[in-house]
Amino acid sequence: QVQLVESGGGLVQAGDSLRLSCTASGRTFSTYDMGWFRQAPGKERAFVASISRSGDSTDYADSVKGRFTISRDNAKNTVYLRMNSLKPEDTAVYYCAARARYQPDFHSWGQGTQVTVSS
């Protein structure tokens, strides 16, 4: 199992930007699809974005399209989530996750990083 550690969360104002990072242990990072999810207070964890092993394919939740960008650097074992034009409704704990090839679901999770957007 890959170990994941997120960083970069914080308290910002509406309209600000943040970049989250998630660094993976091990030498097989490039064999995993990576994703970002978030969980707001009182809500279930929800998909935010994903990126393929090579980085040539990405997917986004409708609520973040055009504002968030997922990217990865396989040489650094790191996946990023650039968040622009942040809104109060983006407030949540953000988790990164890994999915091995041929697996249907994301199966390895980080501990999460808090993002709070004030109005």
Image (cartoon, grey):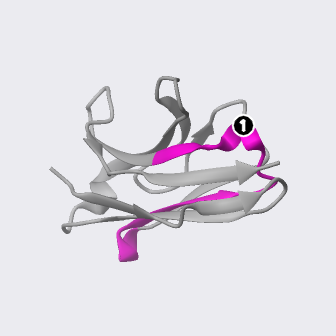
Q: Is residue 81 left or right of residue 84?
A: left
Residue 14 on the magenta span: no
Q: What kind of element bears circle 1?
A: helix
Q: Is residue 50 left or right of residue 6?
A: right
Residue 4 can be seen in this image: yes
| Residue 19 rendering spot, x and y as whole percentages | 61, 65
The quarter of the picture where residue 91 lies is: top right
Residue 64 can be seen in this image: no
Residue at 64% across, 51% down: 116
Magenta stretch in the rendered image: 74-94
Residue 53 vs 92, above or below: the answer is below
Q: Residue furthest left?
A: 1
The quarter of the picture where residue 78 lies is: bottom left
Residue flagged by tag 1: what amino acid is it? Glu
| Residue 106 rendering spot, x and y as whole percentages | 33, 35
| Residue 29 rendering spot, x and y as whole percentages | 29, 61
Residue 91 on the magenta span: yes
Residue at 47% across, 23% down: 44
| Residue 102 rendering spot, x and y as whole percentages | 26, 33
Residue 47 vs 52, above or below: the answer is above
Query: Along the line of sight, which residue is nearer the eye, 62 or 116?
Result: 116
Residue at 72% across, 37% down: 89
- Total numbered labels: 1
Q: Which residue is mark 1?
A: 89
Q: Residues within 10 Å of mark 1 (few under 14, many from 20)?
A: few
Q: Residue furthest bottom?
A: 75
